[in-house]
Structures are given as structure tokens and as C-alpha cells.
Amino acid sequence: MSTPTPRWLADLSRLLAIRSQFVISGNIRDSFLQPIGASAALVPLTRALWETLKAQGFRCLLIFDPIDGLRVYPNEAEPRELAERLFDLKLANGSQLVSLETLSNLMKNLVGQREARCALLIDFASRLPRQVDHLSEAEHRFFVAAEKLSLHAAALPGKEGSALLFNPVLWLMNRPQDLPSWFALDSERVASLIVARPDYETRAAAASQLAPLFAGHAEATEAARAKFLKSFTEGTEGMSLSALADITELANRQQLGLGAIDDAVRCYKVGALDNPWRKDYLRAKIREGQGFIEDRVKGQHRAVTKTLDILKRSVMGMTGAQARAGSSRPRGVLFFAGPTGVGKTELAKTLTQLVFGDERAYLRFDMSEFAEEHSSARLLGAPPGYIGFDAGGELTNAVREKPFSVVLFDEIEKAHPRILDKFLQILEDGRLTDGRGDTAYFSETILVFTSNLGIYVENEQGQRVQNVRPGDTYDAVEAKVREAIGDYFKYRLSRPEILNRIGDNIVVFDFISAEVAERIFDGMLKNIARRVFEELKLQLAMPAEVRAALLARCTRDLANGGRGIGNALEASFINPLSRALFEHELEGKQRLVVSGIREEDKVVSLSLQLG
């Protein structure tokens, strides 16, 4: 496989005849694939730069940084002696500390040097000025001298009448804005080169070079090697070549062979070798998951079944299998829609309990807190340069800390549309970069969105009216809710692409039926009895007629689902029970019987028997 030349190096070679200085920024701390003799190797930027300059007839490269001062590259006798003679240097220890004024004079000498082609690389140039917008007098004089030099420098011939080229000054920057803004803008002789992340072809060439370092490479078939190269290249989209080398080192330490390249890449991304998605016990738990979930989320058989189907697809690694290329999308995406209080959030908690053994392992974000556009800084991190950008975002930090998790975005329709745009990148690429430049990978998460869209809609007069009601068939509820969700994303937000990436993962919940409501009521009543025993050591009981009266009061209106039943139970039972118990002496009592319930002037009271 041929070794592609990075674009910035190709541009440098092409522009040496017309540009005297270069500002090089971007992915500067990466490794670069460079032909060395008959093969290729991953080398630092300095080596890649020198090989390019040497091919153009350059005889030495001076490197300056604010800590070590001035040195010569390569550190060999001939270029070092040449540099010492031409620039009056004393490099007894390999380097020499110099001031900005001395560096300025050296630059002037270098660009006019006719005896030998030389270049100067100023490394860590971002750290030269203390404050780029408030330069000291010495800093300002230095940069003005450099600007003047860029305009007055002349291209010089090499030996035997070769082409005219500049002896260039190269500034190695983290970001172009780390230099005074006027420096590059006001000089046509200063070129800006951006070192980009490696493209597919470059990563494929690097993967081919690194492949022999993986266990089992020598014995692998051509088909296995080809599959490895494809997986390694596609799985490292957006990564540096240094990251590919680190993945190889990680695989070597863990004795991971060619067939385990996906595990090696995932381990590098999320920082964990153990993958709970591939545990046999998880498949067994999901196989028995229907009963476990429906014991907590009652009356939502269709929603639970579809959720488990999506979960099974995630565990089997089949998410996005229809795509031609591999994907780093989230393990699963679920969009829970339907009436309030019917179990959407509870299903997300139960799903977490099923997969990770602890319902508290889920990450919850109440999207009503992100209704303003500027609140995206909390969720995703402030942009670079803004206050707090170095703190990262709540979402990105949480996912980096817990890469295997269920991430719940509650009431997604309440978030600002600009924040919703960020979910496009998560849903498509499975990653998000915060203000610090750190990337959070969502490839091992399940994303759950909840929404009440479609329950109420606006009529032609702009009034909010109920779109679906208790008693409607499930098919009618599902059709109307899906239609309303589609209208919201397509027409109100004008972002159909978000809906397109969610796909058919919309799970519509039904209203609570009278039968389900009674089961929910009984479950809540048991919880109350357990709390009474834990706190007061009393056994709670009530006659059937009292239970029936209380059930009728609490399930009169099912529009608010299980949460409405809980609220009614609190008002009609817990509050009057607490009031009555507060007035009684409970010392030595073991049994509590609620013998009656009545209401006078909208105040509910209970009759108690203690024994």
C-alpha cells in the first residue's frame, strides 16, 4: 500500500517558492506516516518536516522552543557544525538558550543565508506571548520584526542554479489565533497550513504498517487480514495516527489478536476492557426480561415488547447492521412517547436495572432545564475561549465517567432546538467533543428520549386541545402520537433529520386502563403498608369496602396515569392517615386498621382502630 503524503506537507513543498513564513496549526502533535528507505514508519512532525525539507535540498533545521532554547535537527555532526558556523552558535550541550532579541537576529540571518538552505521551526509558539491581545514591549517588537522579515525576505537559489526557494520560518501553533491577529493578516508572505486529522486512506496505510504487531498476524489468512484492516480503519474515524499506535500497544499488552480489533478500539475509546454487552449473563437476564419489566411497568405490553426487541438487537451488535460500513452509533436509541404517568421514565429505570443491575446507573437529564440556547454550555461545555470551557459539559463528562450506561433525556421537546441539533452528531457518529477538545463516545450507551408530544395539540385557533383520550384504542393512540411527533420535527422545528435518525425506535405508551389502574393502586398501597411498618412498627389493614371506596377515589380520573393515582392516594389516604396517627399514642401498638373513610367540606378523614 502506497504512503499518502499529508496535504500540509505537500502544500509546504509547493509554497516554498512564494512564501517566506508558515503558521502550522491543528493536529501538530500527531504521528505521521513517512517513507523511510524501502518502507514507511510513524514519525513525529519534526521528522516528517525534515524529510520534506531535505528532499528540497535543505541542509539543516533549527528548532527553537521557549524552554530548551535553540537546537539543530537532525542531531548529527554535519548539520550541527554547519549551524554553529553559519549562525555563530555554541551547542556544546545540544542546545542554547537565547532571548527573543537574539532569536530575531538569528531569523534575519537565516532568511538571507545564501551558503546553505536552512529553515527555522519555532515550536510551542503558542506559548511565546503571555497574552496575545496584550503583548509586552519586547514581544511586540519581536513580532513586528518577524512580520517585516516576512515581507522583505527573498527567495534564494540553491546549488548549481536550482530553483529559487525561501529559507522559511515555521511557527508551530496549537491554534492560529495564538499569534497576534495582525501578524498573518497583514503579510501576504505568511501562509497558514492546517494539519488535519488523518483521512481514511492515511489510516488504512497506518493500519497496514501496524498490523504485524498484532498477535496472530503471521498465521492469519488474507481474508482475516483484510477484515482487520477494514475494521481498524473504519473504527478509528476521527482519530489521530498516534491513537492508532496506542490502540496497537494496548492490544499487544492485552494479547488481543486481529479478530479482536473492535474490542481494542472500543477499549481505547471508553477506557474499559470489560464489555458488559457481551456477557452471557446479560442475554439470560434479557431472555427473562419481559416478566421482570412488566412487574414494574404495568399495562404496557406492546411498549415493553418493542423495547426488549431493540435491546436484544443492541446486545447482539446488530444496531445499524443495514449500513454498508461499520458504525460507532449508540448501542440503542429509544423514543418513549405517550401520556403522562404511564411508565416512560419507570421503563428507563427498569431497563437500567435489567442491564446493569442498578437502576441508579442511568444518567438523567431533565431537558426543561435546557430551554434556553445558552444552556447548551452546561450540557456540552462552553466553546473554547469562553469562561468555563475547560470544565467540559455535564453530558460529555458523565458519559466519559460511565461509558456503559442508559442516558435518559426527559421531556425532550422542552429543550431548545439548537441543543437538539447536537443530538444529530450523537445519533449518527456516536461521539461528541466538548469545549476542552475532549471526545465522549456514546457507542456503548443506550439513549432514551421521553416525550409527551401528541397528547395535546393546537387547533386552528391556536388553542391547546386534547388529541387522544383514555378509552381510545391503542392503535388510534399510536397513530395520532406518531403523526404529532412527525409534525413537530418536520414542520415546527424544521429538523426532519433528527426524526430520521431516531427511525422506527419510537415506542408509544398506552393510557392506563381501569384494570391496570387497580394493579398500580394495590402496588402503591403495599408500599404504604411497608413504610408504616418500617417507620412505626404497625401492621396496616383495611376492610374490603374501605379499599373499594379508596380505589374509586384514586382511579376516578386516569388521564394522568400512575402518577395521578399516586397523587390522589397521597391526598385521600396518606395525608389523613398521617394526621390521624399524629393525634394517637402509638406506644405498644402493633396493628392499625382503617375502618372508614369520609369527606366533609372537601376534607378527607379516616377512622382508625389501633391494637
Image (spheres, helix red, strand yellow):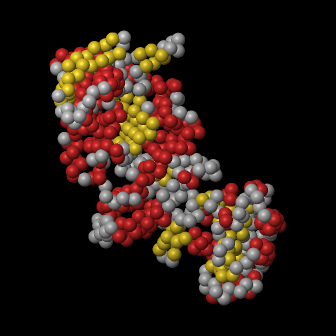
- Find residue 190 and report its horizontal and vertical position in percent: 74, 61
Task: Answer with left or right where residue 162 lies relative to residue 596.
Answer: right
- Find residue 46 and report its horizontal and vertical position in percent: 59, 72
325 vs 15: above or below: above
**Res. 107 in view:** no
- Find residue 588 and report its horizontal and vertical position in percent: 20, 34
323 vs 465: above or below: below
Task: Answer with left or right where residue 127 lies relative to residue 277.
Answer: right
- Find residue 11 and report its horizontal and vertical position in percent: 64, 62
* Residue appearing at x 34%, y 60% in the figure: 273
**Residue 270, quarter of the rendered image:** bottom left
Quadrant (top left/top right/bottom left/bottom right) for the N terminus:
bottom left
* Residue appearing at x 43%, y 66% in the figure: 246
Task: Answer with left or right where residue 357 lies relative to residue 93.
Answer: left
What is the total number of numbered labels drawn onto the structure image? 0
**Res. 120 in view:** yes
364 vs 512: above or below: below
* Residue appearing at x 27%, y 47% in the figure: 357
**Residue 27, quarter of the rendered image:** bottom right
**Residue 164, quarter of the rendered image:** bottom right
* Residue appearing at x 72%, y 60% in the figure: 131
